[in-house]
Image: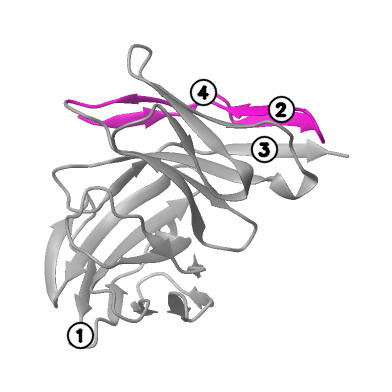
């Protein structure tokens, strides 16, 4: 079974631009979560989607948004990029939403550099 | 608010020696605890979890973790370290108010020397 696939693997953007990241979950998984990883802040939860609906959102500004399609694939968008948005963005999937003991399966991430 | 702390930024051990990576947590209610490992340029991989039951949890690659409620700790252990265990290790606690979202510790870099 294929794992979580994130594209692109690397992105370089300039301040003020916008960017869209893509995530394909494991087949059959309906929950997709996004995390931002930076050396200073570590791993921080962005949002979670289940059945095309955003179920939970972390403490990030409105410039960060996402969506999920009927095939469970998800996209994350960051508008008006800032230097501080440079990070590794990780997508994770799980088979159930809100399942307390459910483990997450992570993709390899998209490394975003904002110049 | 729920939180998790990993007091050591780096742990160094020699191959063949036992290793411990420390984690303490703060939750209201019963904790759901996880350990994940991250290799360079890769995403996180699940190692093990504690939900309920036996305080000693066994996971992937020979790792285990001991849940200690009185000390609010969930330390990761392995009896005999391998060079290939060198990686970044994250402890995490489930955020009950945010679906499947996890609150991660800052991570501990494990370095195993040959």
Indicate the secondary structure of the residue bearing disc 1: loop
Q: Residue at x 24, y 88 (%)?
A: A71
At 24% from the left and 53% from the top, the residue drawn is B100
Q: Which residue corresponds to mark 4?
A: B7
Count how many numbered circles sit on residues in the image.
4
Above/below status of A50 relative to B47: below
Magenta span contains residue B9 = yes
Mark 4 chain: B
Quadrant holding the C terminus of chain B: top right
Q: Which residues are magenta?
A: B1-28
**Residue nearest the viewer, comparing B69 with A19:** B69
**Disc with the residue nearer the chain's start (4 vs 2):** 4
> Of helix, strand and loop, which one carries label 3?
strand
Q: Identify the residue position indicated by label 3 in the image.
A: B110
Residue A47, percent from left and from top: 23, 60
Q: Nearer the viewer, mark 3 or mark 2?
A: 2
Residue tagged 1? A69
């Amino acid at each position: 079974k294929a794992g979580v696939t994130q594209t692109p693997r690397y992105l370089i953007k300039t301040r003020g631009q916008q960017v869209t990241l893509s995530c394909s979950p494991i087949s059959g998984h309906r929950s997709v979560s996004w995390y931002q990883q930076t050396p200073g802040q570590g791993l921080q939860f962005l949002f979670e989607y289940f059945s095309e609906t955003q179920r939970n959102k972390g403490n990030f500004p409105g410039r960060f948004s996402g969506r999920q399609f009927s095939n469970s694939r998800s996209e994350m968008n960051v508008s008006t990029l800032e230097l501080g948005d440079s990070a590794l963005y990780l997508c994770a999937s799980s088979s159930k939403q809100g399942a307390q003991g459910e483990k997450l399966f992570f993709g390899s991430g998209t490394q975003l550099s904002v110049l | 608010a729920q939180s998790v702390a990993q007091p050591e930024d780096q742990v160094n051990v020699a191959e063949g020696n036992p290793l411990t990576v420390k984690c303490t947590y703060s939750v209201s209610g019963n904790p759901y605890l996880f350990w994940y490992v991250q290799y360079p340029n890769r995403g996180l991989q699940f190692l093990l979890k504690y939900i309920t039951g036996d305080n000693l949890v066994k996971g992937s690659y020979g790792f285990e973790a001991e849940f200690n409620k009185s000390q609010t700790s969930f330390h990761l252990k392995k009896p005999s370290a391998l060079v290939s265990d060198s990686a970044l290790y994250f402890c995490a606690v489930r955020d009950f108010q945010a679906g499947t979202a996890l609150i991660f510790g800052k991570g501990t870099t494990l370095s195993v020397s040959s």
